[in-house]
Amino acid sequence: MSHSLAGDHDPNTSPTSNPHPTTYPQFFLFGDSITQFSSQVLFASLAEWYSRRLDVLNRGFSGYTAPMGYDVLRQFFPSDTAPSPTTPRVQLMTIFFGANDACLPGHPQHVPLANYRQALKSIITSPGVELHQTKCLLITPPPVDEWQLGSTERTAEHTATYASACREVGKEMSIPVLDLWTIFMSKAGWKEGSTGALVGSKDAPRNEVLGKLLNDGLHLTTKGYELMYEELVQVIQQKLPDQLPERLPMIFPDWKDKLGVLG
């Protein structure tokens, strides 16, 4: 026998006059493979932190550069309509490109520094982002460890220039920046103003700490993602305090409020 649910009513719920589904605001993690591969640590931790307040969505694209990211953003980011009961607002978005852009000239993924800067600016000012008044947060590419890479497509020095460019775009556009390059390098013993071969370069001794943060010289280890999450939380606390979970409303009420339970 088939049963229709059309007339069923749960005594523990009350009818609503809203004919549209309730949507959660969204938090996009937008970037390349380092974002795509973050699901078990960074993504999961953020989803837990923002539970019942924002839907955290992984929009990482392995191998993509910032210009490629800008191109695909226009295809999936809702930009033809303002947020509504059926179009969730993209409230927060991390922008994490540069690791591939920083490939050396001659490599297919190489993006000239000026083009990299412009692509980041284009993402930040894209129609959908402006329409949704999305709070953006830039993340610099992490350092690379030439000792692990086993190839000559990327160098520590060249990647450092792209991290610097990302920081400069953040300053110019008044966008918060998670300076992952400096955080990882500082953990590895590097200090601002240091002279000599850069940590991660084969001209410097192999660095044990950097080896524990990067699993292949480019992508992050579990420890690397854990550190990234901790530092991202700090940036949100300091630069985007209005976006802290405790300051955002729960989309649906607590069960006690739902049932009218006091205390």
Image (cartoon, rainbow, N blue to C red):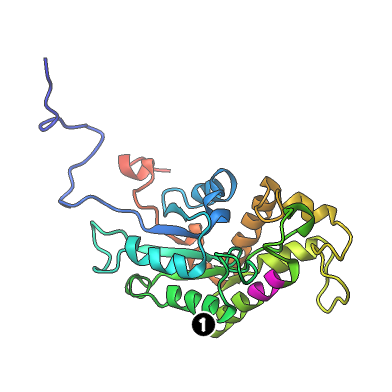
Name the foreground residue: 187 vs 257.
187
Quarter of the image that includes the N terminus: top left
Does residue 132 belong to the magenta stretch? no
Quarter of the image that includes the C terminus: top left
Q: Residue furthest bottom?
A: 172
Q: How many marks?
A: 1
User: Residue 211 in the image: x percent, y percent?
Assistant: 78, 52
**Dot 1: element:** helix
Residue 157 lies in quadrant: bottom right
Name the foreground residue: 100 vs 5.
100
Q: Residue at x 26, y 52 (%)?
A: 22
In the picture provided, is 170 more to the left or to the right than 198?
left
User: Residue 149 in the image: x percent, y percent?
Assistant: 72, 54
Q: Residue furthest top?
A: 1
What residue type is disc 1 on? Answer: Met
In the picture provided, is 163 more to the left or to the right than 25?
right
Residue 238 lies in quadrant: bottom right
Relative height, residue 89 to residue 166 (above, below): above
Residue 35 lies in quadrant: bottom right
Q: What's the magenta bit mostly, secondary-structure-wise?
A: helix
Residue underneath mark 1? 173
Does residue 160 belong to the magenta stretch? yes
In the picture provided, is 220 more to the left or to the right than 81?
right
User: Residue 109 in the image: x percent, y percent?
Assistant: 55, 65
Q: Residue at x 86, y 66 (%)?
A: 203
Name the foreground residue: 203 vs 152.
152
Relative height, residue 221 to residue 104 (above, below): above
Q: Which residues are magenta?
A: 158-163
